[in-house]
Amino acid sequence: MKLPFPRERHYSIWSRIFVVAFAILFAAFVYYFDQVWGFISHLASLASPFFLGFAIAFLLVPVQRRFESVFRRFIFRRKERPRATRALATLMSILLLLALVYIFMKIMVPQMINSIKSIVGYVSSFLTTNKDKLNQLLLKYDFLSFDGDELVVAWENIVSSQIKNITTLLNNLVLITSTIVNFLYKLLVGLITAFYILLDKDRLAAQIKKIGYSLMRRERIEELIFWTRKANRIFAGFISGKIVDSAIIGVICYLGMLIFGMEYPMLISLIIGVTNLIPFFGPFIGWAPCALILLLVNPMSALWFSLFVLFLQQLDGNVIGPHILGDYVGVSALSIMIAIVIGSGLFGFTGMVLSVPLYALGYAFVRTIIYSRLRKRGLPTETEKYVHAPEELKTEGAGEET
């Protein structure tokens, strides 16, 4: 069939049609953004159990490998049974996770609830005892002051209103039951998804690679596989290592507070351990509320706790952290700080935790491109060689930056 226009204009016309169609779709997306975003949010909510399962499987991969190594050494050393080893290691990894969750709920949660109740009661007693001094302090510095018992009444109203809210929540059995059932459903589906991902992860990876080889050129798909493996090493090393590191810091904090006789060791150690997941800012974020709690109870405990947290931060930054995490990040402290600030502003706590490995992956990608271009031009890759550039820059064989 003869084209009604020259062949050289055929591709140009189709490219323009594509641009116009894309512009129309983009305008429709912007105009119906609320509806589209609501649909995407609904899909994400439906898929959240599977996201949870993927996250659980991602975190349990190192545990599964350890179990597989133990089973191959002691149980299946005479005759290898890969499927049985994988299934048994996967089951033991899931059971270990459930055991840790049960221990946390059984031991830590009641102690934290008692600590919170004690803190609320102490604050009420503190305000009642020192209401006159607090009122004089507020008057002295031109803050709003309360006459008589208004400060105590205000605090008691806050506490009583929260108690009423909790009571209302507890009375609404249907809502609580629905929430619990929904949580258990997502947890169950997530655990089942994690089990099957861990059980067939090699086959799933092979199927994805087969699809990639069928759709892309071999050089491109192998480059994509290389960067996928590198991303997995960075994320797995950083996240799992950071969890272990934070758990160790939390345990050390708990034991240290018990030894020194500080108040609320379980609650404060949990706060320190969780906030330690945040790189760079974590110790300072955890220290502030904990020091304030101790300051209300015992100022000397707050002072000793501040010194103890400073010691923990140095121990973690110079001994425990580098030993566990290794050199997964390899970027400067300033760039880590910038990445955390941007990540927290966009995605909250999750962004603060994931911003560092994401930045490390982007840094590795950009560095690879830069090093490749420098080698093609016969230039060195060591940063020190560019301190006095261009006067003393020599064209030479490229080496690796340490």
Image: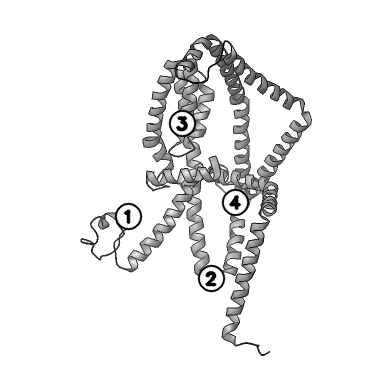
Among numbered discs 3 and 4, the one appearing first in the sequence: 4
What is the CA distance from the residue labelled 2 to the residue labelled 1? 31 Å
Q: Secondary structure at mark 3?
A: helix
Disc 2 designates what residue?
217
Q: Say which amino acid is labelled 3.
A: Ile
What is the CA distance from the residue labelled 3 to the residue labelled 1? 32 Å
Q: Secondary structure at mark 2?
A: loop
Looking at the rendering, in which quadrant would you find the N terminus?
bottom right
User: Are there few (<14), some (14-19), or many (20+) residues within 10 Å of tag 2?
Assistant: few
- Residue 343 x, y percent position in the rendering: 50, 45
Disc 3 designates what residue?
249
Q: Say which amino acid is labelled 2.
A: Arg
What is the CA distance from the residue labelled 3 to the residue labelled 2? 47 Å
User: Are there few (<14), some (14-19), or many (20+) residues within 10 Å of tag 3?
Assistant: many
What is the CA distance from the residue labelled 4 to the residue labelled 1? 41 Å
Residue ID at (25%, 57%): 385
162 up-or-down from 150: above or below: below
